[in-house]
Amino acid sequence: MENQKSKIKNQKSVLCIGDAVIDAFLTIKENTLIKPGEKIPVESCEFLLGGNACNVSVGLSRLGVKSFLCAEIGDDEFSQKIINGLIKENVDTSFLKQTKGAMSSFAVAIEAKNDRTLFVYHVERKHHFDLTNVSADWVYLSSMGKEWKGAYEKVLSLVKNSNIKLSFNPGTPQLAENSEIISQILQKTDILFVNKEEAVKISNFSPRGEAGKFQISNEKENGENIKQLLRALQKMGARIVVITDGKNGSSAIDEKGKIYSFGVLPANVVQKTGAGDAYTSGFLAAYTQGKDIEGAMRWGAANAASVIQEIGAQKGLLSYDFFRKNNN
């Protein structure tokens, strides 16, 4: 792969903190009925890199950002595949933590008719990361497993005691708890990335009730409710909030309270794995390289549209050259 980094002036750096896993994609014929004890023929099988932080680190690297991945993995054969894949994508692995004797987390996705059923095995990690020598411009903090609070506290301390900016995308384990650490991190967040369902959950964390209890019930009400969600989340501390909403595209609010919206781009959908991570890496890469909110949303939408046309979360990620050649 051609190295895009030499073309970027004043190249920015992002430390991505979260998970790295192996995704196994099994494609079966439409209308295949899976019964216990049967042998089901598979049309194709691929073992690919996945995990929120891993996907974003690769996406950023392809788009000209110096990216580091801070994640905990095992030392089995799949773990080596993760390392080799990151090196191939020019992602710095110096913050990667390998735990001796541990195996890789993985997900098995059964794909049929552009839809998927996902089986997930998540190895419990301690996430004892050493962030004492971080000198990146940005941190991207994402989902982790059960033992996540210690790592989140370290990130909070890091951004409080440095000039490092924070982009944040909490995951299911974090949103399952109305934890004070989430509220504290939101107050230090420069860009918050969430989908609509995550936005509703976070907005209802508010101890003072500014956000109310959101229930988005129909498409007619959707646009106005998204605006309310953007404002509510910004009141909780995030300076810029970005909400993705599937086929409805994305919406964002800037530091001055101006709201933007951007639709989805045409795509031949093969599968939807990694669309959100692709959007995030496109937006964040554009924004850190001087694009305005609308330009960043355009990069995010294009990256997401490209990813869903390929199997896996990373194969379709766009390069910096793509946007340079298309004057974006």
Image (cartoon, rainbow, N blue to C red):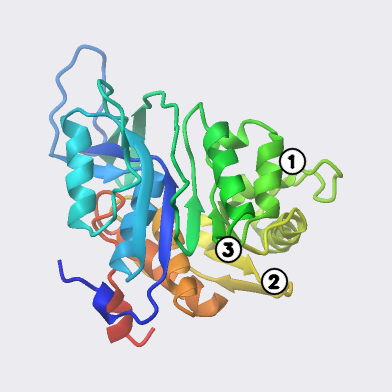
Return the residue nearer the eye: 198 or 32: 198
For mark 3, what is the residue? 163
Question: Which tag is nearer the camera, tag 3 or tag 2?
Answer: 3
> In the rendered structure, which amino acid carries the disc numbered 3?
Asn
For mark 2, what is the residue? 255
Left or right: 198 in relation to 91:
right
> In the rendered structure, which amino acid carries the disc numbered 2?
Glu
Q: How crowded is mark 2: few (under 14 residues within 10 Å), some or many (20 or more)?
A: few
Instruction: Estimate the spatial distance between the alpha carbons at disc 3 and disc 2, rounded to whole Å.
Output: 18 Å
Instruction: Estimate the spatial distance between the alpha carbons at disc 3 and disc 1, rounded to whole Å.
Output: 27 Å
Instruction: Estimate the spatial distance between the alpha carbons at disc 2 and disc 1, rounded to whole Å.
Output: 21 Å
How many numbered marks, from 0 up?
3
Q: Quadrant of residue 12?
A: bottom left
Secondary structure, mark 3, is loop
User: Which labelled disc corresponds to residue 205?
Assistant: 1
- Of the numbered discs 3 and 1, the one sitting upstream in the chain is 3
